[in-house]
Image (cartoon, rainbow, N blue to C red):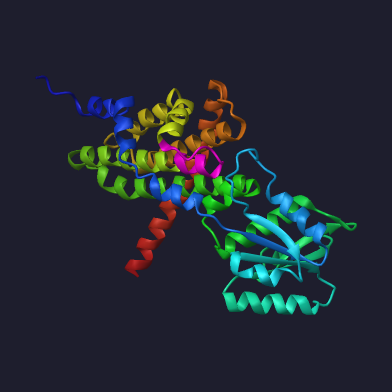
Amino acid sequence: MTKRPPLAALASFGSLKAILDVLREVDARPARVAAETPFTLLFASQDLPFAEHLVSLMYRGLRSHELPPHRAAIATSLEAAPALVKHVQWVGVLQRETDAPPPAVTRLQRECELAHIPCLPLLLREGTLSLSERLSTQAAYVPLRDGVLDEAEAVRAIISAVRAQRIADDLALARHLPAFREVVVRALIEEVAITNAVYSLGTGIFEVNPVTGLPLAVADVVVLTKNQALMVWKIALAMGMPADFRQVMPQLLGVIGGGLFFRQVARSLVGLLPGAGVLPKVAVAFAGTYAIGEAVYQWCAHEERLNRETLQLLWRRALAVGREAAQQLWRVRQSTRSSSRA
């Protein structure tokens, strides 16, 4: 039997069957459990209609028609809130910053402390917020414009505060509350893209040796593919799509299979060629992951497959960002090595 050249063997790994074999090894259960774990956010206020309005904002967002049956955000009066504390995971107390807290707030805070439940003041503030207020972990500042709620800023403040307190997994927050979906998915895409870039940087140092390069190259493609597949699955869960891995993944592979995914695998071979250098490979690892995530996110959000021109534009933009990320990672690595030698 004629032995195939190394690059031909690597190229065959990009076949649909090989990729599906890798996907079968992905354990989809932990992500599904995390995404479907119920939680409840409680918004309490003397002005119950205002609290109910904030709850309604949590249910606005992408694919708001796709929601699990569990009610993840509820509103109540300050007086009724203490009785509900043991049944929720987070409490937001809405009041004007200039008003003295009524006795009911003190009672509610005490009940939350006893139950070890986060109780965060949601302070209504007229005007523009400062940077320190936007980043505050002690309170979430909800801005007003001429006495009218700034809905976009209010949602941003609440999302930031809830995620910072880690009362539930990000996947669950997004799956149950559409307002969280875009923020959570974009953070996920960036995180996995950086993870793949860092991994490629680490293995790429050894792959410059033609003798040791090929085995690591094959393992590299397997690891990157698994990470990307799990990212795609998490995006689907976060966007409220059916929690059936075997049902959803073929649809998502169809979105990326004809274009970005195979192009990314093919172009990654350039980075595996001896002498091609580490940074191009790192850039492609980041760009391929980022572009795949963005394509899947857009499809989940709008149920429209991106056309070839849009995919190509997305790839070029992702590759430009990937090159910058590769340069930054390389500088960090060099700086770390210099510090360790000092």
User: Does 224 sit left or right of 112 as displayed?
Assistant: left
In the displayed structure, does residue 169 sit left or right of residue 195? right
User: Which percent across, then down, holds residue 273?
Assistant: 28, 34
Residue shown at 89% from the left, 58% from the top: 147
In the rendered image, the vertical position of residue 201 relative to residue 6, given as above or below: below
Front one among 253 and 56: 56
Quarter residue 134 falls in: bottom right
Q: Position of residue 121 (x, y in %)?
A: 72, 69
Residue found 50% across the figure and 54% down from its top: 37
Apparent side of residue 339 relative to residue 98 in the rendered image (left or right) = left
164 within the magenta span: no
Residue 256 versus residue 119: which sits nearer the camera? 119
Residue 94: image location, x then y, percent: 76, 66
Q: Which residues are magenta?
A: 232-245
Q: Residue at x 30, y 40 (%)?
A: 25
From this view, report whether residue 43 is shown above or below residue 217: below
Instruction: State yes or no: residue 236 in magenta.
Output: yes
Horizontal relation, residue 6 to residue 261: left or right: left
Quarter containing the N terminus? top left
How many marks do you count on the picture? Answer: 0
Q: Is residue 137 visible?
A: no
- Outermost right residue: 146
Residue at 68% in and 58% down: 158
Q: Is residue 201 visible?
A: yes
Question: Residue 91, percent across and down?
Answer: 66, 66
